[in-house]
Amino acid sequence: MLFAALHHHIDRLEAKLDTAIDLIKNLVLLTQNLSQQEHQDMTATDDAIAALTAQVAANTTVLGSAETALNGVAAAIAAAIASASAAGATPAQLAEIQALQTQIANDDAGLAAAIATVPAGA
């Protein structure tokens, strides 16, 4: 009788241990899945940050190139006005190109303001 009672208790303990082992296995699988999901989320976040950083760098380069080009055009127009004026062009003859020079200076100021909004080092 004692042997039967011990056997019965051992069977119940084995069943509980089997249940506990199954729960632990499920917990390990859940932890692994969560870890993989976290890794995927971090990778996606890192990729998004890298893409944004690259876009900001490209925009900064484009804005800088545009500002340089506008400055070059403005300098060329200023030189042309000075040359034409020295050659005897009248203010009326120079008015249209001077208006263009003013428009480029305004565009340059707007571009400089846009460039100033780009974070340093971006």
Image (cartoon, rainbow, N blue to C red):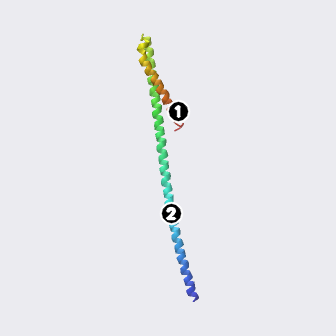
The residue under the point 45% across, 15% down is 82
Height in image: 120 above or below 108? below
* Identity of the residue furthest to the bottom in this view: 1
Q: Residues within 10 Å of mark 2 (few under 14, many from 20)?
A: few
* Quadrant of the image occupied by residue 88: top left
Give the residue at mark 2: 30
Mark 1 and mark 2 in contact (Cβ < 8 Å)? no
Taking the image as shown, residue 96 lies to the left or right of residue 14, namely: left
Q: Residues within 10 Å of mark 1 (few under 14, many from 20)?
A: few
Height in image: 34 above or below 16? above
The residue under the point 45% across, 31% down is 65
Q: Amino acid at mark 2?
A: Leu
Q: Point out the tag, 2 or 1, that comes first from the N-terminus.
A: 2
Asked if residue 62 shows in the view, the reply is yes
SS under mark 1: helix
Q: Position of residue 120 (x, y in %)?
A: 54, 36
The residue under the point 47% across, 34% down is 61
As measured in the structure, the alpha-carbon distance from the residue carrying label 2 to the one carrying label 1 is 49 Å
Give the residue at mark 1: 116
Q: Amino acid at mark 1?
A: Ala
The residue under the point 53% across, 80% down is 11
**Total numbered labels:** 2
Q: Position of residue 95 (x, y in %)?
A: 43, 16
Q: Position of residue 34 (x, y in %)?
A: 50, 59
Asked if residue 76 shows in the view, the reply is no
* Identity of the residue furthest to the right in this view: 2
SS under mark 2: helix
Q: Position of residue 56 (x, y in %)?
A: 48, 39
Height in image: 45 above or below 22? above
Could you tell me which quadrant the N terminus lies in? bottom right
What label sits on residue 77 in the rendered view? none
